[in-house]
């Protein structure tokens, strides 16, 4: 159902999951919150605060929290609602809260979310006291650095120190990174300013591409495209653990998981048959594509199917009979054939 909703509304599977989860919780477990939503006392975002903070409690505890919040929803901001719900959950289920807290602390992780205008958000899901200590350390270091360098704001100093500490092996070296950027040769040389593609992020401007390409330690690999379509024809081996030639071509062509709405970089995805090998699917660039593990397995679920359309494209059919077509984007815009300049002109 989550995948169906994601495709129908053109949203990510995480967004679709939240929509489905919130709807089910309001109808089944939180009648007072649903009533407040229907009356216009709260919007869907505020209602989702109640749903999210009660998702892991029993139906009995959810009912107690819902009753507790009945008179505490209207004319309150989302943050205040969230704090009240958290208080009620701890009040009515202290033992369960302790168990869930231990489980959450064990699930600490780091995540990456790409934003607009060449920026991204790198966040850590950490125990509160650890996260607070890290931020306090950054703030102290930024304040000290600000005394001698006022060309940057405190926020900029905090961000720069954060990046330096994570990327430099000994805390003092030069940051190093490994990313995949796909750029037209004309843009790389400065003859054009067409956007390039940063794997997992999307379009980035030519000036940033040239900065990355010119950085010490950057390595280049040649990709040959069809000038009339922009589609990839050949991918030469790179210097960083080159895979088999077919896998190399597919990852360079697709750049990310080809399932609609999924943007997991191809470097971290699998090379998958659209028509499976068990169903006599060919192992070639027409029937193979980059797919994350979730969407690789999805087409094997009952009611789901996929048919290749050529060059890594496919048509997906869902259990409800809806169809969606996906295909890799060309590496550059199609270019017309050059005019014949042989005499007579």
Image (tube, rainbow, N blue to C red):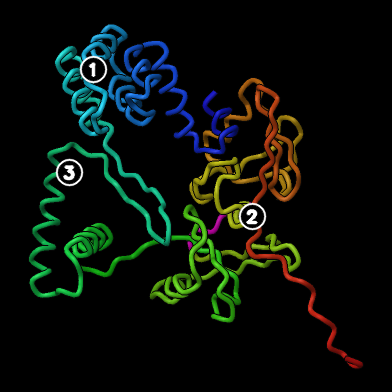
Magenta stretch mostly in which secondary structure? Answer: loop
Position of the C terminus by quadrant: bottom right
> Vertical placement of 258 versus 84: above or below?
below
Instruction: Please give the residue where the numbered disc 1 appears in the rendered image.
Output: 69
> To which residue does mark 3 refer?
131
Q: In percent of the image, x 48 and y 47: which residue is there?
A: 268
Q: Mark 2 points at which residue?
A: 329
Q: Residue at x 53, y 42 (%)?
A: 262
Q: Where is residue 327 in the image (x, y as percent from the top left)?
A: 67, 48
Q: Which of marks 2 and 1 is nearer the N terminus?
A: 1
Q: Please tell me in which quadrant of the rendered image residue 192 appears.
A: bottom right
Could you tell me which quadrant the N terminus lies in?
top right
What range of the chain is rendered magenta? 240-246
| Above/below status of 302 relative to 210 | above
Tell me which label, 1 or 3, sits earlier in the chain.
Answer: 1
Comparing 142 with 82, the one in front is 82
Mark 2 or mark 3: name the one nearer the start of the chain.
3
């Amino acid at each position: 159902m989550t995948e169906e909703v994601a495709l129908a509304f053109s949203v990510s599977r995480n967004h679709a999951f939240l929509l489905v989860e919130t709807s089910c919780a309001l109808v089944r477990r939180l009648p007072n919150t649903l009533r407040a939503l229907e009356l216009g006392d709260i919007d869907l975002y505020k209602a989702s605060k109640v749903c999210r903070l009660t998702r892991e409690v029993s139906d009995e505890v959810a009912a107690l929290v819902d009753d507790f919040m009945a008179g505490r929803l209207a004319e309150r901001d989302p943050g205040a609602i969230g704090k009240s719900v958290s208080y009620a959950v701890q009040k009515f289920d202290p033992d369960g809260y302790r168990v869930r807290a231990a489980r959450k602390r064990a699930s600490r992780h780091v995540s990456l979310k790409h934003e607009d205008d060449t920026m991204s958000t790198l966040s850590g899901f950490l125990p509160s006291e650890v996260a607070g200590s890290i931020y306090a350390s950054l703030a102290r270091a930024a304040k000290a650095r600000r005394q001698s360098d006022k060309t940057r704001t405190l926020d900029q100093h905090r961000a720069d120190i954060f990046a330096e500490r994570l990327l430099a092996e000994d805390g003092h070296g030069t940051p190093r990174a490994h990313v995949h950027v796909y750029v037209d040769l004309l843009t790389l040389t400065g003859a054009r300013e067409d956007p390039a593609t940063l794997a997992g992020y999307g379009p980035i401007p030519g000036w940033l591409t040239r900065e990355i390409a010119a950085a010490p330690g950057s390595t280049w690999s040649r990709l040959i495209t069809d000038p009339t379509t922009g589609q990839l024809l050949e991918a030469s081996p790179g210097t960083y653990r080159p895979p088999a030639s077919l896998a190399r071509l597919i990852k360079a062509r697709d750049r990310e998981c080809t399932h609609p709405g999924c943007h997991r970089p191809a470097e971290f995805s699998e090379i998958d048959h659209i028509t499976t090998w068990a169903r006599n699917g060919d192992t070639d660039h027409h029937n193979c594509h980059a797919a994350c593990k979730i969407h690789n397995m999805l087409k094997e679920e009952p009611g789901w199917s996929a048919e290749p359309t050529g060059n890594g494209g496919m048509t997906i059919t869902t259990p409800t009979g809806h169809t969606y077509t996906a295909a890799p984007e060309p590496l550059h815009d199609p270019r017309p054939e050059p005019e014949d300049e042989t005499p007579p002109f």
